[in-house]
Amino acid sequence: MTGEQGFVWRIRVYFEDTDSAGVVYHANYLKFMERARTEWLRMLGVGQGELSDTEGVQFVVREARLRLRQPARYDDELEIVSRMVLLRPMRMRFAQQVRCRGVLLVEGDVDVVCVDKMTFKPVGIPDKISTILRQQLSGDLLEDW
Amino acid sequence: MTGEQGFVWRIRVYFEDTDSAGVVYHANYLKFMERARTEWLRMLGVGQGELSDTEGVQFVVREARLRLRQPARYDDELEIVSRMVLLRPMRMRFAQQVRCRGVLLVEGDVDVVCVDKMTFKPVGIPDKISTILRQQLSGDLLEDW
Amino acid sequence: MTGEQGFVWRIRVYFEDTDSAGVVYHANYLKFMERARTEWLRMLGVGQGELSDTEGVQFVVREARLRLRQPARYDDELEIVSRMVLLRPMRMRFAQQVRCRGVLLVEGDVDVVCVDKMTFKPVGIPDKISTILRQQLSGDLLEDW
Amino acid sequence: MTGEQGFVWRIRVYFEDTDSAGVVYHANYLKFMERARTEWLRMLGVGQGELSDTEGVQFVVREARLRLRQPARYDDELEIVSRMVLLRPMRMRFAQQVRCRGVLLVEGDVDVVCVDKMTFKPVGIPDKISTILRQQLSGDLLEDW
């Protein structure tokens, strides 16, 4: 769902996600955040497999920043809260949070760029998609972020 | 190196490989075994990237069996010992062991099949490659396995 | 849900699960199968985190066999169908299938053993848990497998 | 080795590291960077397993920033170049680069903090370790970064 707080996607922590320190291995938060962005796009009707097949483009992470405040642990049910906070002709920026039982665990800022799938050079987001994305960027949503 | 015992590839266990039980997560042994097969092929002059580009085929795992006897832990230096024990026109079988300081931790039997990279249908291993592979299958090697 | 066919758990394939061959990386099916077993235990009221904390034991994979028939791909929604087919004082065996749109992709047989979490030595499954598990092993379920 | 450019650790890209876009999955660069930091500490005589066992502390990632300039691909041999650029009583900052054949692919800034392994609260880096680390922070090294 997308509410005032952004799109929420729930993820369960399995053994595969943890490390011997007893907590979620830090790199795996980037996986969780990509799952959430994928589901947000799916909710908007944007299938990334189809995008690659029909338009020859794909979204790739160009820059990512993670701040880990508290660790998630085995069996936690996490909420990944995601908002697109910037939309440019060739890229998007997401502000994402990982929460557990109301507590903020991890924050991430992720820049995603649209690239040609063969050359990996940045290209414009296809019109059909950018029209859909633009509607998600209301001033209201941005103000209360 | 390939000796009487097979090809030995060393792998260090990092945090990423462990889980919250404090040991290597079981699925990761399949990764370690693939790294070792990749390095064995590289030693024989078989580059899998080139194989895909020039011949349009790739090796994929068709069947795998793991027996986990003792756990590996963070920072262990593992030896992956690998031997090809069967070679057929379209596939190979490997017997692989994960050892640490002389102790057998995990055994695996892995069937790898040559497939067309577009259709994933089994195809013959290219002649140039199967000639190289056949030389690794001496009776001596098989007998003392 | 657990029906005649077993417990069904749905998993979406994300980019993290695929490899450059364009399909799900083989080791990741073991992860999917563990997620399904975890959810089956959760449905039965068995929390593995609690089991470790209160009883000092945990379930670990002792043996696993994978047969990969057809590849899963990015964005596929998979059904992991799981049935416990054997229950012994210290271990369980699961027969698991990965299906997509009704097609069988991967089969797995996984032996899980109950171990002391400090020594990793096999120990008896706690009575409270084995009572719950025994009820899942009806003859009817076994016959139509 | 540690030279003017920093500590260099070589990593081969295997199938497990790639995704269906044909390149290294972005989260995996964080794994590569941790492997390099681990090996840098090992070179200095700092074993993180021992640190946990004897001092009850461990190093965990608190903040990480990745900039992905060009993709790495299957079979690439990467150089992870790592330098500690900040040392505080409870934490370190690393500037890390992933290069391939002389080309810069990915840059990362990673803040690592020393925490109590039970509470995950920040604690001082043990004296024995911080003495070793301080010797790595020469002004010369910093100037030519």
Image: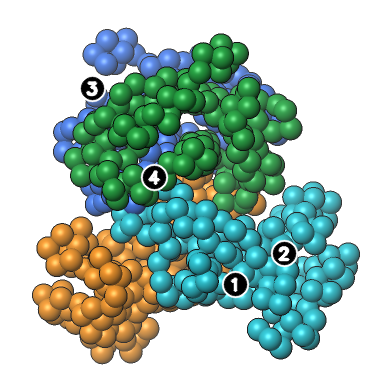
Chain colours: A orange, B green, C blue, D cyan
Q: Which label lies toward us, 4 or 1?
A: 4
Name the residue rendered at 47%, 76% in the picture: D67
Locate the C terminus of chain C and report the quarter of the image it occupies. Answer: top left
Distance of label 4 from label 2 (alpha carbons): 30 Å
Are the numbered discs 4 and 3 placed on the same chain, yes or no?
no
Distance of label 3 from label 1 (alpha carbons): 54 Å
Distance of label 4 from label 3 (alpha carbons): 43 Å
Are the numbered discs 1 and 2 placed on the same chain, yes or no?
yes
Name the residue rendered at 40%, 66% in the picture: D71
Tell me the residue that label 4 is attached to.
B48
Crowd around label 2: few <14 · some 14–19 · many ≥20 (10 Å): few
| Drawn side of residue B127 relative to residue A78, left or right | left
| Drawn side of residue A145 relative to residue B2, left or right | left
Crowd around label 1: few <14 · some 14–19 · many ≥20 (10 Å): many
Distance of label 1 from label 2 (alpha carbons): 14 Å
| Amino acid at the residue labelled 2 | Met
As drawn, the label of residue C4 is 3
Residue A65: x percent and y percent? 48, 75
Tell me the residue that label 2 is attached to.
D1
| Drawn side of residue D66 relative to residue B117, left or right | right
Q: Which label lies toward us, 3 or 2?
A: 2
Are the numbered discs 3 and 1 placed on the same chain, yes or no?
no
**Viewer-side residue, B138 vs C107:** B138
Residue D145: x percent and y percent? 65, 84
Tell me the residue that label 1 is attached to.
D96
User: Can residue C11 be seen here?
Assistant: no
Identify the subunit bearing mark 2: D
Crowd around label 3: few <14 · some 14–19 · many ≥20 (10 Å): few
> Does A19 appear above or below A112?
above
Name the residue rendered at 11%, 75% in the picture: A128
